[in-house]
Amino acid sequence: MEPVESVEPLETPRPSPTVSALGLDRRIPHLNPVRERARFLEGGDFSSSAVRPPILDSWQRSRFFGVDADRIQAPYNADFDPHSRLATAARPVLDRLSDALQGTPMCLILTDSKGRVRERRTGDRALHRHLDDISLAPGFSYAEEYVGTNGIGTAAEDGRTAQVFGSEHFSERLQRVSCAAAPIRNPVSGRVLGLIDLTSWQHTASPLMVALVQEAAADIEERLLDIGSERERAALRAFLTSRQSSRRALVTLTDGLLLADAAATEMLGPADHRRLRELAADPSGLREQRMLLSDGRTVQLRGRQVEGDEPGGHPAAYLIELRLVAERDESGRHPVVRPPRLAGISGSSPVFRGVISQLIRHCEHGRWTLVEGEAGTGKQALVRAVHRHVAPAAPIGVHDAADARGGAAPWLRAVFQDLAEDRGTVVLRHLDLLSAHVLGQLDGVLRTTAGRSGWVAALLTHDRPRLPGAGAEALPDADRVAASRQADPVAAVRARFGAEVTVPPLRHRTADIPALVACLLARHGGDSGGVRCTDDALRALSRAPWPGNVRQLDGSLRYAQAHRSGPLIEESDLPPSLLSQAQHPLSAWESTERDLIVQSLLDHGGDKAKAAKALGISRATIYRKITAFGIRLGPEKG
């Protein structure tokens, strides 16, 4: 979620330029790659000198994506916030330019960073109808992976201004139009937020379309900076006002700013900042609730939105109050002791120790526990280790919901039999895979066996961590189940569990990576050969974002072991994907390009000039690609 604030334009309106002043009545230079495109599509020999390099690169990407050259298959997604920061900043610029272009065969288009059309201003009826026919309309995506070479998609892929004349389009259906598009960047971070495009008939196109969209993009970026300043001022006002009356630690968040008072600064670490941002991004995440800090302490937090100047618009910021909670045992007389080490489990970071403490406590008291977390965080391994520590002689039964796909009745019967034995631990995995109907049947099984004394742990995987909403615990069980069923199918089963624990993602416990690496290498048999990671390799592993968590770390180490040339795992042995941190998900083409650049840099000791020469690209290009892909290697040699 990107908090925004709508403001009126601060600059003096510019006079509307005339069509002749813009040079839109001029014709483009002769350029006709029709024959070369046909040869390219047929897979035969063609003259690359007859095609501009950016267009040829785009054709190759389009073929790699499998784009149909004869049909337009643009996906549709109408989910767009008209009050977003981008839309608010672009509106007056689009108004001014559309007035200037009224009555001309020109169309102004605003898209998001992925090429999805968000707004369209057309000054010609015939062009308007044609753009509808080719799905160049609000809601449709014009990314290269769907429609091939075009101004919008090519500018999004290259990260720079692109102009595509009629016959240069990959798709036959786009060849009646020409277009120019320029990226709109966040003035602070440089991240692409969207694109501004100018489309015309092929025979009325002008090279000056490029200058026009570049100027428009610069105007929108200037307004983005103004809006950002206004939003930050609103956040600061809310922070200072609340600080006078609040007795809790105080934090204010915007998309690019975090304000914290002295108490919050001492309390929170970088991982806690990320967690707060994740909660603020979740519409239900700002209710009063508890959060485990990276140092193992627990805080009670409550948050509210800081409204912007425009009624009904997006919030300018989020104001969050935090209060430390003293953790006590069930009797309330003694502080919680530090958890013991669990066999097969590595990690001593405070946030991970806190999770282990909670699970051991719930297992000892037989409290049914919902264990949540992202895929690959090791939820099952952790639950098994806790069971072995607390009740090593008791049985443990694991029931994977994936097995219910072959028949729900046998799976439910096995679950019931294990629960009815009233001893040992029962683990239910992947409940998120069950249909609503089977979840309802499972809910009945859980209700029937609710009095058992053994521990029951249900493992739930989700893309992002979430915390339970406040207030649900105060409802009677029947009311909780009824209310939960209306929210989502899993919620009815969730209500049967008296405790919930979230296993943190690896990016929130990077201090555990060295110990995890040693444990995983030993598990692979690397201890016998003395295999270990160099300091540079460990630093690279600690910097990686790890969307696949411990499972991805394990796979990366297996890859490194297979590629090492000695007893040490060097940085160059790691998968290329770990050595870059791009600001957006990479396409297959971008991933291949990134891997080639990383490998060339490794082959030449980090020397960018030599790597660029080996790849056949300029030094400026490799610097730009390194920045775009977030490639990070060890210090250059020589």
Image (cartoon, rainbow, N blue to C red):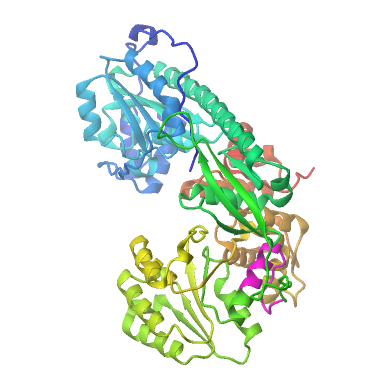
Q: Is residue 554 magenta?
A: no
Nearer-the-camera pick, 402 or 60: 402
Q: Residue 23 appears at what percent x and percent y?
A: 37, 10
Q: Residue 376 appears at what percent x and percent y?
A: 55, 66
Nearer-the-camera pick, 381 or 48: 381
Q: With respect to residue 110, does 381 lie above or below?
A: below
Span shown in magenta: 341-358
Nearer-the-camera pick, 324 or 352: 324
Q: Residue 261 appears at what percent x and percent y?
A: 69, 41
Is residue 162 shown to the viewer in this render? Answer: no
Relative placement, left or right, of 95 versus 468 is left
Q: Residue 460 appears at what percent x and percent y?
A: 47, 69
Relative placement, left or right, of 79 versus 386 is left
Q: With respect to residue 108, does 42 lie above or below?
A: below
Nearer-the-camera pick, 458 or 31: 458
Which residue is painted at 72% across and 57% down in the image? 537
Which residue is painted at 59% across and 57% down in the image? 546
Relative placement, left or right, of 66 versus 7 is left
Is residue 501 shown to the viewer in this render? Answer: yes
Quarter of the figure with residue 57: top left
User: Outermost residue, right direction?
Assistant: 638
| Number of marks drawn | 0
Q: Quadrant of the C terminus?
A: top right
Q: Is residue 355 magenta?
A: yes
